[in-house]
Amino acid sequence: MASTHEEQIRIVQETVAGKEITFAHVMGSPAPIIYQKLGLNPQVDYRSSAIGIMNMTPPESAVIASDIAVKSGNVYLGFADRFTGTLIITGDISEVFSAMTEIVDYFRDSLGYVVCGITKR
């Protein structure tokens, strides 16, 4: 009779973060409730505003991306997390899209990251 301990298989799984931007999206004219729930600046013109959100690995890349964003145009840094790699920026639709384009281009062309396309709605 076989022991149940001999029949068990142990699996060890590890993830290795690559150098990549996995998500980049611009939300044009988001509802005011989204700003409020995310704790973003509620005193904006919602008709011409946008929220840009990105996710990247390694997560410390969000620090570099936030620097590029605020230097590329008139955007507000809503959230940058060096532990999860999440970045949220707000501003006019054209400014947010331009900042995200600057980030994606720099990470792809200068840092050798694999990047996704920027989606917009």
Image: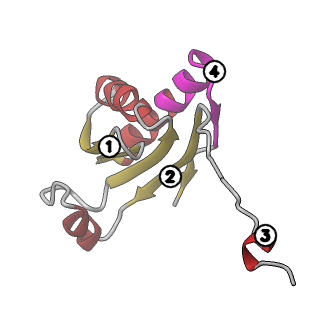
> Which quadrant would the N terminus be assigned to in this image?
bottom right
Q: Determine whether 46 is above or below 97 in the image.
A: below
Residue holding disc 2: 25
Q: Amino acid at mark 2?
A: His
CA gap between label 1 and label 4 equals 21 Å
Residue at the top extreme of this rendering: 110
- The residue carrying mark 4 is 112
Residue 49 occupies quadrant: bottom left
Residue at left 66%, top 53%?
Answer: 12
SS of the residue under disc 3: helix
The region drawn magenta spans 103-116
Specify whether 30 is left or right of 100.
left
Whole-angstrom CA distance, mark 2 to mark 1, is 17 Å
Instruction: Please rate how many residues cluster around mark 2, counting C-alpha atoms within 10 Å: few if below 14, some from 14 to 19, many from 20.
Output: many
Residue at 62% over, 46% down: 15
Among numbered discs 1 and 3, the one appearing first in the sequence: 3
Residue contact between numbered discs 2 and 1, judged by CB atoms under 8 Å: no
- Residue extending farthest to the right is 1
Q: Amino acid at mark 3?
A: Glu
Expressed as whole percent of the image width and height from the top left, the position of residue 35 reads 24, 63
